[in-house]
Image: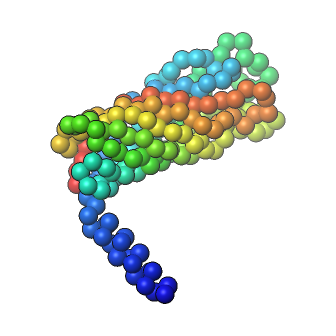
Amino acid sequence: MSRKILLILSLAVFSVSANAQFHFGPKAGLNATKIDGKSFKDQFEYNYLVGGFAEIGFGSRFAIVPEVLFSQMSTTLADGVDGSIFNTNQAKVKLNYLSIPLLANVKLAGPLHLEVGPQYGIVISSDETILKNGENAFKNGDFSMIGGLKIKFSKLHLSGRYVIGLDDIGQLSNDDTWKSQSIQVALGLTIL
């Protein structure tokens, strides 16, 4: 009985794989970021993102789009923040993330596509020296949700997205929660 189920599942996976269209390429763009929390200024700061994407199409209207992106996030400390928890007089914080979104891409009309899905970001380096009792101020990861639109022109695509962090990325034991936000505009090029 289990061999029949395994055979049926294998045939189903092969059938879906055979009908899938696969494309990939590089992408780069602007990443406007901010961290919500009373410790930081309520303003977006401009950074960049660069990486690659794959597109696994199922039919003419739906695709799964995994990406791997190097992205920067920066913010500025708010005026009047208690300096006793911070090393030096640094006012700016910059974090480098390896972001891994997994998006559902739905063709709406013509070249317009909707993209939605989760993203996990891993802090790979930071120049922040904000410390309290010898601990880092920021957690090593951030889970987010993405929503946006993509316009596809043959091999070139232009995308605009809003990324909202769902986790508190701060790990200092204070009453302030820190959540990330990003507005991303990027160009991608399909090379296969």
- Left-right relation of 31 to 120: left
- Residue 50, percent from left and from top: 39, 40
Please say if 189 is above or below 129. below
- Left-right relation of 44 to 158: right
Residue drawn 72% across the image and 12% down it: 80
Give the quadrant of the C terminus: bottom left
Along the line of sight, the residue nearer the viewer: 129 or 17: 17
Residue drawn 53% across the image and 33% down it: 164
- Left-right relation of 105 to 171: left
Query: Is residue 177 visible in this depiction of the protein?
Result: yes
Residue lying at the far left in this picture: please name it.
Answer: 154
Along the line of sight, the residue nearer the viewer: 80 or 103: 103
Residue lying at the far front in this picture: please name it.
Answer: 1
Q: Quadrant of residue 112?
A: top left
Residue lying at the far right in this picture: please name it.
Answer: 133
Please say if 177 is above or below 28. above
Please say if 104 is above or below 114. below
- Residue 22, percent from left and from top: 28, 58
- Residue 190, percent from left and from top: 24, 47
Please say if 178 is above or below 56. above
Residue drawn 44% across the image and 28% down it: 183
